[in-house]
Image (cartoon, rainbow, N blue to C red):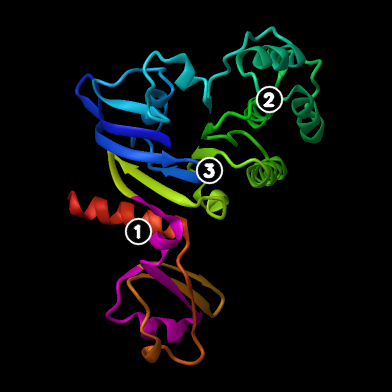
C-alpha cells in the first residue's frame, strides 16, 4: 500500500514540468523529495493532492484512484506555502475547523503544540509574523494524523530553535505513530538524518529513488592534514573540499581503497547534501 504515481506527465505551456514520472511512496517511511528550484517538486505534490491535474498518467492511494476521490484524498494532508484558512479567523477556531475536515485531528495536541512553540491560539491568522504563520501550519500538520503527510518547505521563516523543535516533534510522533511523511526542502543538511528514502528530481525527471543509506554508499569522505589529503586526492573523483586551518576534508565518489589510505587520514561517510550537489554538478556537465 502507499501512494503510487504511474507515468505522470504535466506541462505548463512550453514547459514540461513532469516527464513520465513513476514512483511509489510506501507506508510508514520518511521520504526526502529533493531538487533545485523549478525541478518539479511542488508540481508533483500538487498533483498528488488533486490541487492540479496531470495531462496523463494516474495516481493511486492505497490502490484507489486519487482523482476526485474524497476517500483517497482524505488520507493525505499537505502543508504548503499558502494558508488555506480565512485570514481573520482565530487560531483556535482554525483548529476546530481542521477537526471537522480531518476526523483524527487532535485538538488537545494542537493546543499543546501551540504552547510549546509559543503560539497564542487567541490570535488571528492575519496577525502572525512569517515565522509564526509557518508554526501555525506546522501545528495543524502534526495534529491531523492522516496516513500520509506531505511537508513542502515546512520550516520556511522559522528560526533555528523552532526548526530544531519541529524536527524533534516530527521524529517523536513518527516513532509513536508511524505514517508516510514526504519532506520537500532545500535545507538538505538539516533533514538528512530524518530521511530514510531519497527521491531526487531534476527538470521533471526522477534521477534517484533509493534508500538513503544505499545512496550514500556511492561515495565517502577523507579528512586530515591538508597536504596528506591533497596527495590522496590525486587521480580520484573529487566531489568537494573544505579546509579549516591546516586540516582538510574532501568528499569523493566511488569506494575507498583502504590499502592506499595513509594511517593519519580518516575515512567517513558521504553526507546527503554533498551527494546532491555532486549529482547536480554532474547533470550540469552532461548537459553542456
128 sits to left or right of 223: right
Query: Residue 146 falls in which quadrant of the image?
Result: top right
91 sits to left or right of 47: right
Q: Residue at x 74, y 13 (%)?
A: 124
115 sits to left or right of 130: right
Q: What is the number of the mark on residue 278?
A: 1
Q: Nearer the viewer, residue 104 or 49?
A: 104
Instruction: Identify the element where label 2 is drawn.
Output: helix
Q: Nearer the viewer, mark 2 or mark 3?
A: 3
Count of picture labels: 3
How many angstroms separate mark 2 from mark 3 (CA)?
Answer: 25 Å
Q: Which residue is mark 3?
A: 28
Q: Residue at x 41, y 88 (%)?
A: 261
Residue 31 falls within the magenta-colored stretch: no
Position of 223 relative to 162 (above/below): below
Position of 270 relative to 138 (above/below): below
Crowding at dot 1, Cα within 10 Å, few <14 / some 14-19 / many 20+, comes out as some
Which residues are the magenta region?
209-238
Disc nearer the start of the sequence (2/3): 3
Q: Is residue 266 visible?
A: yes
Disc nearer the start of the sequence (3/1): 3
x then y, percent, for residue 253: 34, 69
How many angstroms separate mark 3 from mark 1 (CA)?
Answer: 29 Å
Residue 222 falls within the magenta-colored stretch: yes
Instruction: Identify the element where label 1 is drawn.
Output: helix
How many angstroms separate mark 1 from mark 2 (CA)?
Answer: 35 Å
Instruction: Identify the element where label 3 is drawn.
Output: loop
Amino acid at each position: 500500500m502507499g501512494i503510487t504515481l504511474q507515468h505522470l506527465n504535466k506541462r505548463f505551456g512550453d514547459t514540461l514540468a513532469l516527464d513520465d514520472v513513476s514512483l511509489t511512496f510506501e507506508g510508514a517511511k520518511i521520504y526526502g523529495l529533493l531538487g533545485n528550484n523549478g525541478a518539479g517538486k511542488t508540481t508533483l505534490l500538487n498533483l498528488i493532492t488533486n490541487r492540479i491535474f496531470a495531462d496523463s498518467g494516474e495516481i493511486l492511494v492505497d490502490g484507489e484512484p486519487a482523482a476526485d476521490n474524497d476517500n483517497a484524498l482524505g488520507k493525505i494532508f499537505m502543508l504548503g506555502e499558502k494558508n488555506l484558512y480565512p485570514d481573520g479567523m482565530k487560531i483556535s477556531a482554525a483548529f476546530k475547523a481542521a477537526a471537522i475536515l480531518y476526523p483524527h485531528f487532535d485538538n488537545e495536541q494542537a493546543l499543546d503544540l501551540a504552547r510549546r512553540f509559543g503560539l497564542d491560539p487567541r490570535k488571528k491568522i492575519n496577525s502572525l509574523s512569517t515565522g509564526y504563520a509557518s508554526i501555525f501550519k506546522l501545528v495543524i500538520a502534526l495534529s491531523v494524523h492522516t496516513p500520509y503527510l506531505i511537508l513542502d518547505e515546512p520550516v520556511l521563516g522559522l528560526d533555528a530553535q523552532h526548526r530544531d523543535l519541529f524536527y524533534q516533534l516530527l521524529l517523536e510522533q513518527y516513532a509513536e505513530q508511524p505514517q508516510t511523511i514526504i519532506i520537500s526542502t532545500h535545507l538538505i543538511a538539516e533533514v538528512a538524518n530524518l530521511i530514510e528514502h531519497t527521491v531526487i528530481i531534476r527538470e521533471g525527471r526522477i534521477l534517484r529513488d533509493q534508500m538513503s543509506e544505499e545512496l550514500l554508499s556511492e561515495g565517502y569522505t577523507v579528512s586530515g592534514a591538508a597536504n596528506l589529503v591533497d596527495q590522496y586526492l590525486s587521480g580520484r573523483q573529487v566531489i568537494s573540499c573544505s579546509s579549516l586551518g591546516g586540516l582538510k576534508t574532501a568528499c569523493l565518489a566511488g569506494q575507498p581503497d583502504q590499502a592506499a589510505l595513509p594511517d593519519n587520514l580518516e575515512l567517513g561517510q558521504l553526507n546527503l547534501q554533498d551527494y546532491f550537489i555532486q549529482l547536480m554538478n554532474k547533470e550540469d556537465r552532461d548537459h553542456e
